[in-house]
Structures are given as structure tokens and as C-alpha cells.
Amino acid sequence: MNSSNKMVFLPLMLALVAPANAHHSINFHFNPDITISIEGVVQEFKYQNPHSELFIDVLDENGVTTTWRTEMTASSTLNQQGWTAEHFLPGQEIKITGYEARRDQNTIYLRNAEFVDGTSTSFTFGQVVNGEVVGDEVEVGLNVLGNWVRANAPTTEDFPDGGPGSATMNNNPHLSKLTEVGLAASENYNVVTDDPNLNCELPSILRAWRQPDFSPTNISQNGDLITIQHEIYDLKRVIYLNQAAHPAGLTPSRVGHSIARYEGNELIIETTGFIPGVLIPHEGILHSEELRLTERFSVDEQTGLLTMSWIATDPIHYREPLSSSFSFARSENPISEYDCQVATKLE
């Protein structure tokens, strides 16, 4: 490593292939096909959600110092990999290798950090998590309760490529199901600038379930109340069990009003009363106040994995229902405060 802290800026086309389970939002803001390296001195490390940030002072060949912003995954994910807020310390000499930002200057997504003593550090986006078989002691119909994390991360192929223009037009399986109104809303939505996540705002219930960083979610029941506590955005949902219908005069909200019932071992949650918003931010799928969302939860007796399948209807935006499913594994990870922080913009 160059101890003089001179800037090293090396475009390495296709030198580092994006992992198959890369965090899907990376592709919108960083190009995994272009890897660069910088060398400098640590100025500050912000250990936070949804993306931690490392600021590096880089000295170029003309003696001019420029601050670079290094983005990485959430602190809630890094915690599970042994990281702490003291992982990087001010004054450390360091070399960062990672993905080049598509638009922001002096910004890189960390894939590896090398210290002056030759040691290095990196993180994974997650790995497949093996579920545990649900024991006989779990009461029939209540085996969906407990702590859960995503059993596998989405692949980069599951989402648009994040290139110039409207990202919603790339590899989007839901576009063919949109009405003219829904398609127009999708085309006018810019995933790079309009995503509510950028301002630490929850787009929709589905965003909490789609969290790829393996933040835990807890499902609990107390009498006729079911509580779903997501770590992401500190979201807490209260669902009313055995209530036949939604009450009249609901005040619309981002998470709506939810009622539930059990059918055998399956928990079914139906939610209405939404304000217009973004159902799937990274695919640019919006919805109106007519959105109806059904979530179905069941545990596989052999693997112990929880399947959450969903169906969304909206006569204004969708010609036919949208649907998909996710798998979750039981987890002992406690739910921590998420405390979302908006990413820093370098001037």
C-alpha cells in the first residue's frame, strides 16, 4: 500500500464481478461492472442504517485533498458479521476497492478495504440461511410466530439494471399487468430520485418484507391481536384477528388497516385503507388508494422455512393482480433500533 496517501484511481472494467446476491439497490446508484480503487486517510465512519458511510481524505498528485464517500450495507447487517462502530478509525491509512458511482462524484461502494499493515476487511450481502424444523411443541396454527430473517437475498437479475433513464423499463415482470394509468405512473417514476427510501421513508409494507440485509422481523400474538415488528424503519404493525371486516371511516395511512384469520396452519392478513404511494420502489410500481393487499404465511414442515406470499389488487393501477413470495428462516437475532439516516451528499 502506498504510505504517501497519493490518490490511486484505477478503472478496472469487469475486474470484480458483482456477487449473485448483491443488494439490489446498489445497481441503481453504482456500476458493478466498473471497479475502482482509492487510497487515503480515514476522516469519519458513520455506522448507521440503511447504509453505513466511510469518508476518506485522498491526496492527489498535485497535493490537493479530496474527500471521498464510501458507501456500504446497513449497520444492522454488519453487526451480524462482527463489525462495530470502531471498525474504521480516524487517521487510519487505507485503500478502498469497490464499485464506481453512476452519478455522484467521489463516491464508491466498498467491496474491500486494505489497511497499511496488509490486513483487509470486507462484508457479504448475506447468504442462504438454513431454517430449523418447527418442533411438535409449537401449537397448530401458531407456528408462524417468532423471529424471522430472509432465507435468501434477491439476485441482481431480479431487479432492473439501474442504467440511465427509467429503470422501471428493464426486466420488470409487473409492467404487463398495469393499466394505462399504472403504466404512466411507472414511466414518470424515477427510481434514482423518487424512491422514498432515499429520505428514510417507508414506501410500503412490501418493502419491509423485501429487506435483503437480513434484518429480523418478529411475529407475535396476544389474544386477538397480532403484532409484526420489523427492524427496518422500526415498523410496527398491529393486526386484528377474527375481525370480520374493516371498520368504516378508516383514516388512510402508508401501512393501512389489517385484519387476519387462520385457515389451518396458514395465517392470512388482509389490508386496506392505504394512501396512494409506491408499492415496489425498485421496480417503480405505484398504487392508488384502492390498493388491497393479501399476505399469506405458512411454515414448511420439512424445512421450517416460512413462506410469505402476497397478492396486490388495485383497479386503478393494475389490470390483474400482482403477486410474489419470499422465504424466511427462524433467527435468534434480536430486533435493534433501526434509526434510519439519510445518506450524505458531498458538495
Image (spheres, rainbow, N blue to C red):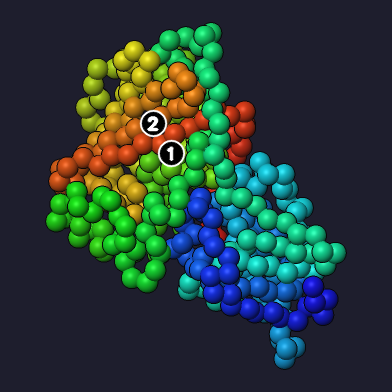
Report the amino acid beneath label 1: Trp
Task: In the rendered structure, find residue 209 and report the number of the disc placed on it.
Answer: 1
**Residue positioned 50% across, 37% down in the render:** 150
Q: Is residue 48 visible?
A: no
Task: Check disc 2 and report its element: helix, strand or loop.
Answer: strand
Q: CA distance from mark 2 to mark 1?
A: 9 Å
Residue annotated with mark 2: 308
Of labels 2 and 1, earlier in sequence is 1
Q: Around disc 2, counting alpha carbons within 10 Å, would you say few (fewer than 14), some (14 to 19), or many (20 or more)?
A: many
| Residue in view at x 50 percent, y 36 percent | 151
Provide residue 261's location: percent of width, then percent of height.
32, 18
Q: Residue most toward the right?
A: 117
Asked if residue 320 lies left or right of residue 220, the reply is: left
Camera-side mark, 2 or 1: 2
Query: Residue 180 location, x and y as percent?
Result: 14, 56
Residue at horizontal 80%, vertical 77%?
2
Residue 191 found in image quarter: bottom left
Q: Residue 300's x, y, as percent?
A: 43, 22
Q: Position of residue 67 (x, y in %)?
A: 66, 75
Secondary structure beneath dot 1 equals helix
Q: Quadrant of the C terminus?
A: bottom right
In which quadrant is the N terminus drawn?
bottom right
CB contact under 8 Å: marks 2 and 1: yes
In-image side of 266 versus 302 (left or right): left
Q: Is residue 225 visible?
A: yes
Q: How many marks?
A: 2
Amino acid identity at mark 2: Met
Q: In the depicted view, which residue is nearer to us: 62 or 338?
A: 62
179 relative to 31, above or below: above
